[in-house]
């Protein structure tokens, strides 16, 4: 036998079980920590309007995330197969529901997130290297309609290059991908710990503390939340209990999805050592670590900056504003280095995990057959490349930004301003992702009934109360989004529903029938 241990030799599927508990925890934590925690607190603060509620939003998001991870632990221990959440939905309901998730994952959830993180990487690299700019054009914006354009700036080129490098390294085998993940996740975790320590010890000042905590629940500058349904009232966090609940639910979008991607380790279950034990522990440890860091980071913000400075931080860069109050102009560079490291490690985990879902779908005859093959390094290289190509394409389209009156926004030089299509897509699928989480956690109840004798090395903590509370909370958030953010919920459903005819086509052309139909 070679020098590899038995656990690291290819298994019956061809994957190598090379991820131990530490590695799996690094995938969980590394996929969660991107750039969101450094930015989204500005929008949350505008929604809820107080320092106290800002912290509570992050605490509740953390509790929901950990509750979901503990529930997924039972499913992962039951079905420790490559594909993770896709497999859970397929086995609990039918291949159709698994496919809808996998299709949406490929179309935008995974690839759109990868594209967004890549642009965040190049955006903050531009703070250190000014040549990496969103307006330094290689191909200037070409308008393809009144609302959309395509372009290639140096910022976009660097984002695509980052995707290409990480995709290539992942095709070289699990050992290299694991090493990159461990190094970058450890480094960025230390960076977040440093941010917290600096904020709490050095940045804490009496003026900010008095402003934020003299009355921590008094709202200031809360945004008006206008429903897309005309029969519902516009509200703010000051509009009584109903207004506070609406503001709280809308604010959850930023914090929940800054905490997302913890489930990615289940996609790579076929490469985890002792998965029936390791997956649940890794998700519990990884989510517990990250949500603790997120809450403490926000405590650091509110003892360093008055609420108004958080709400109106330039470009919503709250962490940068906090460091600038401590280090002056050097704060922006320090934060840029931290985010460059953070986003690089985040995308490595996302890229590694996503291709395993496409592999599982291909083995059910529900995706391109070539994505179901492993290369000589025992990884799904074709799936990795396909994912890279689609994510890179999502970097290129631009939206033409307009004001409330519909006029094209222009910069100081009079040039049109552009946004990114993937940002819109991610907004659209927030609602759909919540639905898939609800469906997956409901699968616990379904499988306890339909497969009572299935081996369950780990059983969900607090079942049935904790999973049920998650479903109720997620459902309430979803309902509020339907009513108050209709314009960004129905497109998400439309994206999911594109999978219906595609599923029918793949089922018709499948080499063998999918299981469990």
Image (tube, rainbow, N blue to C red):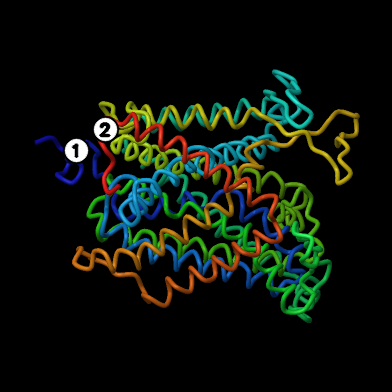
Q: Residue at image x 47%, y 36%?
A: 501
Instruction: Locate residue 8, reporting x and y percent.
Output: 20, 42
Mark 1 neighbour class, 10 Å CA radius: few under 14, some 14 to 19, many 20 or more: some
Q: In the image shown, does 186 or 136 lie closer to the viewer?
A: 136
Determine the image quadrant of residue 2.
top left
> How many residues crowd mark 2 within 10 Å: few (<14), some (14–19), many (20+)?
many
User: Tag 2, which secondary structure?
Assistant: loop
Q: Is residue 480 above or below residue 158?
A: below
Q: Is residue 23 visible?
A: no
Q: For the residues labelled 2 and 1, say whether their Cβ atoms are less than 8 Å apart.
A: yes
> 318 or 247: nearer the eye?
247
Does residue 123 lie above or below 305 as drawn? above
- Residue receiving disc 1: 10
Between 260 and 8, the one lying in front of the other is 260
Q: Residue at x 65, y 44 (%)?
A: 336
Q: Quadrant of residue 502?
A: top left
Tell me: 478 left or right of 17.
right
Give the left or right position of residue 409, taking residue 292 as reference. right
Residue 148, can we see it?
A: yes
Q: Where residue 374 sits in the image (x, y, percent)? A: 28, 30
Please indicate whether residue 244 sits to the left or right of residue 66 in the image.
Answer: right
The numbered mark at residue 43 is: none
Residue 55: percent from the left, percent from the top?
65, 70
Which residue occupies 62% across, 38% down? 422
Which circle marks residue 378 in the picture? 2
Pick the quarter of the image with the N terminus. Answer: top left
Earlier sequence position, callout 2 versus callout 1: 1
Q: Quadrant of residue 25?
A: bottom left
> What distance separates the C-alpha of mark 2 from that of mark 1?
7 Å
């Amino acid at each position: 036998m070679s020098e590899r241990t038995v656990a690291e030799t290819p298994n019956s599927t061809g994957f190598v079980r090379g991820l131990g508990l530490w590695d799996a925890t690094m995938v969980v934590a590394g996929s969660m920590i991107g750039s969101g925690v450094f930015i989204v607190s500005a929008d949350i603060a505008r929604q809820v309007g107080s320092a106290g509620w800002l912290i509570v939003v992050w605490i509740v998001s953390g509790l929901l995330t950990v509750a979901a991870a503990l529930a997924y632990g039972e499913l992962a221990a039951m079905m420790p197969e490559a594909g993770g959440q896709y497999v859970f939905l397929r086995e609990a309901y039918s291949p159709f529901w698994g496919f809808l998730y996998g299709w949406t994952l490929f179309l935008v959830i995974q690839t759109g997130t990868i594209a967004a993180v890549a642009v965040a990487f190049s955006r903050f690299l531009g703070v250190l290297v000014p040549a990496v700019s969103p307006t330094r054009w290689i191909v200037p914006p070409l308008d393809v309609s009144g609302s959309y354009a395509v372009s290639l700036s140096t910022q976009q080129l660097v984002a695509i290059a980052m995707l290409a490098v990480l995709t290539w390294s992942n095709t070289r085998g699990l050992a290299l991908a694991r090493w990159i993940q461990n190094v970058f996740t450890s480094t960025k975790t230390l960076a977040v710990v440093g941010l917290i320590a600096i904020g709490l010890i050095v940045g804490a000042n009496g003026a900010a503390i008095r402003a934020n905590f003299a009355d921590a629940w008094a709202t200031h500058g809360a945004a008006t939340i206008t429903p897309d349904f005309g029969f519902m009232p516009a509200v703010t966090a000051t509009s009584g209990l109903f207004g506070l609940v609406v503001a709280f639910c809308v604010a959850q979008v930023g914090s929940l999805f800054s905490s997302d991607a913890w489930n990615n380790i289940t996609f790579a279950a076929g490469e985890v050592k002792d998965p029936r034990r390791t997956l649940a522990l890794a998700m519990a440890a990884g989510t517990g670590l990250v949500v603790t860091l997120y809450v403490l980071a926000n405590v650091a913000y509110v003892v360093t900056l008055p609420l108004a400075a958080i709400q109106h931080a330039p470009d919503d860069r709250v962490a940068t504003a906090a460091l600038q109050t401590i280090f002056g102009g050097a704060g922006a560079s320090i934060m840029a280095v931290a985010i460059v490291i953070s986003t690089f490690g985040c995308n490595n985990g996302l890229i590694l995990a996503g291709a395993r879902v496409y592999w599982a779908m291909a083995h059910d005859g529900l995706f391109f057959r070539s994505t179901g093959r492993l290369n000589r390094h025992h990884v799904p290289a074709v799936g990795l490349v396909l994912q890279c190509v689609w994510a890179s394409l999502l970097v290129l389209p631009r939206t033409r930004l307009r004001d409330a009156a519909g006029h094209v926004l222009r910069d100081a030089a009079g040039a049109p301003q552009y946004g990114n299509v993937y940002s819109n897509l991610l907004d659209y699928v927030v609602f759909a992702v919540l639905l898939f989480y609800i469906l997956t956690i409901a699968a616990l109840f379904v499988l306890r009934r339909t497969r009572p004798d299935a081996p369950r090395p780990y059983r969900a903590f607090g079942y049935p109360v904790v999973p049920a509370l998650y479903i109720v909370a997620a459902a309430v958030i979803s309902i509020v989004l339907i009513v108050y953010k209709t314009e960004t919920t129905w497109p998400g459903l439309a994206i999911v529903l594109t999978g219906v005819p595609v599923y029918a086509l793949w089922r018709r052309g499948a080499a063998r029938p999918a299981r469990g139909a």
